[in-house]
Every structure is written in structure tokens, then in C-alpha cells.
Image (spheres, rainbow, N blue to C red):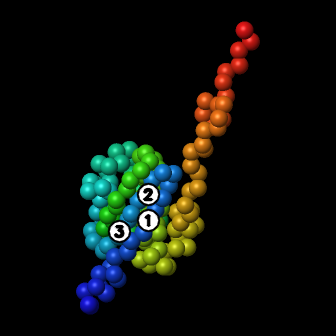
Amino acid sequence: MSTQTKKSDSMSRAVGRRKKAAARVRITTGKGNIVVNDKDYKVYFPTKILQDKVLSPLVVTSKETGIDVSVKVAGGGPAGQAGAVRHGIARALVEWNEELKPALKAEGLMTRDPRAKERKKPGLHKARRAHQWRKR
């Protein structure tokens, strides 16, 4: 029973969402490894912009080393998945240590970004793109 208590103290879980993507995040004390869908995050997110987006909650709280992050992410595209991972890491850090919340909130990392694709309307090509007008 005591190992169960110890495990919950050193680990926390959270879910992050962005557009159509959902990320299940688990953080534990460790060496600073970040694994996304059983791959290193630099392999899963090959561009520097997406890598920085994933790291931003850890950089803001100065926890780049000392915490291992394991993520399962599904749905959406690369940008949405990176945003979902960032949101999940921020929420997991707050669950792990409540004192980190003001710093994360000040950077806007605790808020779920509500922007999503607008639905297509009938009679239009896309959500707002109408047919091209033709005189003859």
C-alpha cells in the first residue's frame, strides 16, 4: 500500500487538447526525457517551432531536467498535437505542484485554445469561400 502512495506522489497525469488533437500526459521524476507515442519528441516533432512549443511549459517553470514526460497523442495534425501536448504538460505540472500555476497562467499555457476549424456552409466552397463571380 505504501508503494501506491509513493507512486502517486512522484507521478501525475493530465489531458491536453487543441483543435482535434488530444494528448494524455504522464510526468514522473527522472532525467528530463520526453517521449511522444513511444518516440523521442525530437523525432515525433521534427521542426524546431513544434519542439519549442512542446518544451515551453518546462522552460517557463525551469523543469527541463528532473522530470520525465510520457505522452500518448492522437487526432489532428502536427501543430494541433504539439499544442495539445503543451497544454497537457502544463496541466500535469500544476497537478504535480500547485505553486507552478501562476507562472504557467501568466504565459497563457493553462488556457485551452478554443479556436477550431469553422464548419462548411451550404452553397459555399468552404466555410466562407463563395463561388467566383462571372459576368459572362
The answer to whether the residues at label 1 and label 3 have Cβ atoms under 8 Å apart is: no
Q: Residue 88 is drawn in which quadrant?
A: bottom left
Type of the residue with mark 1: Val
Q: Quadrant of residue 32?
A: bottom left
Left or right: 28 in relation to 119: left
Report helix, strand or loop for mark 2.
strand
Circle 1 crowding by C-alpha within 10 Å: few under 14, some 14–19, many from 20:
many
The reply to whether callout 1 and callout 2 are in contact (CB within 8 Å) is yes
Mark 2: amino acid: Ala
Q: Secondary structure at mark 1?
A: strand
* Residue 93 on image: x %, y %: 43, 72
Residue 3 placement: quadrant: bottom left
Question: How far apart are labels 1 and 2 at the CA level?
Answer: 7 Å
Residue 8, how many percent across, how many down?
A: 34, 81
Q: Nearer the viewer, residue 67 or 77?
A: 77
Real-space Cα separation, disc 1 to disc 3, in angstroms? 9 Å
Are the residues tagged 3 and 2 within 8 Å (C-beta)?
no
Q: Which mark is residue 26?
A: 3
Q: Residue at x 31, y 67 (%)?
A: 68
- Which of the pair 70/23 is nearer the observer? 23
The span from disc 3 to disc 2 (Cα, nearest Å) is 13 Å
**Tag 3 or tag 1, which sits nearer the N-term?**
1
| Residue under the point 58% across and 55% down | 114
**Which residue was labeled with disc 1?**
15
23 versus 47 height, above or below: below
Quick one: label 2, few (<14), some, or many (20+) residues within 10 Å?
A: many
**Percent position (x, y) of residue 46?**
34, 45
Please report the residue visible at 65 percent of the width from the left and 35 percent of the height from the top.
122
Labelled disc at residue 22: 2
State left or right for residue 136 relative to residue 9: right
Q: Nearer the viewer, mark 3 or mark 2?
A: 2
